[in-house]
Amino acid sequence: MKDEKLQPPKNKLQTSSFKLPISNLQSLTSPRSLFILHCSLFILLAVAYNFANPLFEGIDEIRHFRYVRYIALNKSLPPVSIESSKEMQAHHPPLYYILSALITFPIQSDADATYTPPPNPFWGFRYYEPSLDNKNQYLHAPDERWQMSGTTLIVYLARFVSLLFGLGTVIMAYRLGRLLFGDDKLALSVMAFVAFNPMFLHGSSSINNNTIAAFFGSWVIADSVAIVRNGVSRSRAITLGIAMGFGILSIASVWTLFPIIFIAYFIAWRKAQKTNSKLQTSNLKSQISILHCLLITLSLITVISGWWFARNYIQSGDVMGLSEYRSAWTGEAAFTRRLGEAISGLPYAWTTFWARFNYGQIVLPDVIYQVITLLCGLSLIGLVRSYRRLLNPQSLISNLSILFSLAGWGALMITIPATANARLVFQIFPALGALLVLGWSSLLPRKLFSLISSLSFLSFALYSLLFFLAPAYAYPAAITSLPSDAKIVSANFEGAAEIIGYRISKDSVQAGDQVEVTIYWRPLAPTASPFPAFVHLVDRQRIIAAQRDTYHGLGAAASHQWRVGNIFADVYRVYIPETAYAPETLTVRVGMWNTVENRPLITHDNDALEIGTIQLAPKPLAINFANRVTLVGYDAERRVLKPGETLTLVTRWRVTNPDKEYWWYAHLVGLDRKIWKIANGPFTPQLTLNELRTETRDILLPNDLPNGQYFIEVGVTSDGQRKIGILADDGRQVGDYMDVVRVRVEK
């Protein structure tokens, strides 16, 4: 017998402990485990987005909330009317709102179907320049997010309904990926695309009917793909009918998926025909079976959603129930103008596919959207390489769903330009994700791509949450010491707060420039109501050339909810109008306004703290009225007047398109935009091309005009009727009048 080499005795415990991690690792990386992981991460992120986004700040969230409350309180649907469309989104089908009302109606709350939270009147400041100013439409109590009762609890429960349907959509994305690719790794990538899309997470954490539409819409797409891939069956016909029926009861945009049902059945019929021909069997039985299943689908759609259309027709004479909605929101703009606005809104719409929160005011850096666009371009290259997979029947169904939904969305944007938001096509996010994933995966090894894609999408979701959404509504960070370039002062505003320092970004500017004034506040005591702060740039005649009024912390630290003693910095971006009177020396004045007594708070026996001066230089003026005439200058001989006196306004114009008879007007308006005096009339004589023209208006001030400051607004009309819009350098319309001069009236 041969001698055997002595071996150390096997340690069963050691052996098992060595193999266990490998086994666990395999288990953790299995498709089932990764599927559960993606679902779990989605839930955690949606909850985080929920708490980062204050109550009612989501787009139209207050109107969706009112719809829910109306049903909960009245046990019926709101009437179809212009008022209900404006106030509570009552033109939308009711499924989401009924479900939310069912789980919230037992909760006691003072909020009814007309409820409005405390508004932030400064929210809309320079709305067209997002990410620079107020983000919150409403004022929020410091502990609002943690009150699990009353209105707050109703909001969270309604948001929870959105989260559940968002989770359902994520699951449907995985199912669609499996149907299209037959590959767990690619299906997980499609799942990650939806689950970690910041816009979808935001929608899944707000009160809206978009995520429920996404769930049923993606279900319709997945079932249609299943019919094409696996054939027609009674069970698929039933589930497809249920999905489409409830999808229609969720939002009108799901209607865009209706054609793919017929296309899916047609493809299935053609495949069955070819199969029967090869097997030399009769087509008749197969055709009858497919037709029978189609009738089942259509019947279920009718039974589930038909009552909604009957109700709409009875109440408004419109089957879809959208006539009142269009009347409420479309306006009277001509088709060409609406088309132009829709086209100009496409870049905005593109950003809403990825991360542009609430009313478009919270945006990511441009470079992020540029990188996303580049990556989508790379996917397109990959799709060219994988064109054969694009042509298979199941991919055709998925891609047609994208095409039809985008076409419907485009038509809606032309009808109502304000609808340029990707939340209206949430139902195609899984299909869009599948399309992009197919392109990307063809450029990378399959195994490597799955890991990279999931981590990339997850990082994108976290980046958007932590660096943009959450900070937008956060209370200003407390500081312990002032920066070295800050100037030290001490000004106490009646025991409410004190200013301990400041910085002014510039000491000389041109009209049209921006000045940043940083004020370091120390809160001393909460005020009875929110007292706004103000920064005024005042000229030598005590006329305000520019101003910025806002609640502290841009609305996040209103004075009635101050954290006493916490020093924080407020940055006030003061925009000097391009029409500001110059040259001038402007004094910077900072203060607070007592909204209870309607007066400024006093400091140092003055109604404001003067912290420095700025030299204002003139800038060539060019106010473009729709490429027809351009205001290039003005002069007002006197800017301090008494009631009953006459203000003479001299204006200079450049004519670029004298195709009609144009009028121009000069209105004397108060700070509240009340018109006190109108002076209008045609350009005289008739305008000629490329002419430089001087025009004068005499504005007689009313004898009863109260003391105060007023604007002179200038505009142009066509034949004295229709106002002509002002165009920015990029072609956007930015209004139809311009404040050209500010005057002070004193008796």
Image (cartoon, rainbow, N blue to C red):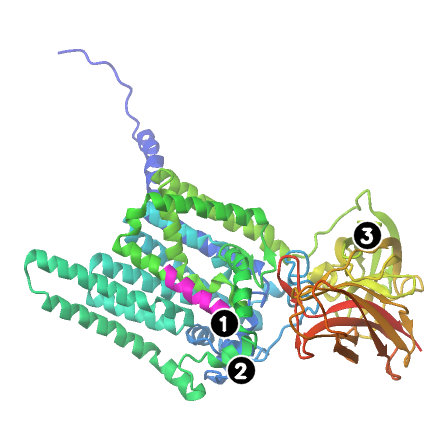
Q: What residue is rendered at 26% in x and 18% in y?
A: 7
Residues rendered magenta in the picture: 402-414
Per the image, label 1 sits on a secondary structure element best described as helix
Q: Residue furthest left?
A: 280
Q: Which residue is mark 3?
A: 509
Secondary structure that dominates the magenta span: helix
Left or right, 305 with reference to 129: left
Q: Is residue 712 above or below residue 460?
A: below
Dividing the picture into quadrants, the one containing residue 578 is bottom right
Q: Is residue 535 shown to the viewer in this render?
A: no
Q: Residue furthest bottom?
A: 314
Residue farthest toward the top in the current orientation of the protein: 2
Q: Please, what is the three-letter code of the amino acid marked with disc 2?
A: Ile
Q: In the image, residue 312 lies at what x, y percent?
A: 42, 83
Q: Amino acid at mark 3?
A: Val
Give the spatial CA distance, label 2 vs label 3: 47 Å
Work out whether residue 127 or residue 677 is closer to the camera in this orientation and state it: 677
What label does residue 82 carry, if any? Answer: 2
Residue that numbered label 1 is attached to:
415
Q: How dense is the environment of label 2, judged by Cα within 10 Å: few (below 14), some, or many (20 and up)? A: some
Residue located 51% across and 76% down the image: 89
Residue 403 in the magenta stretch? The answer is yes
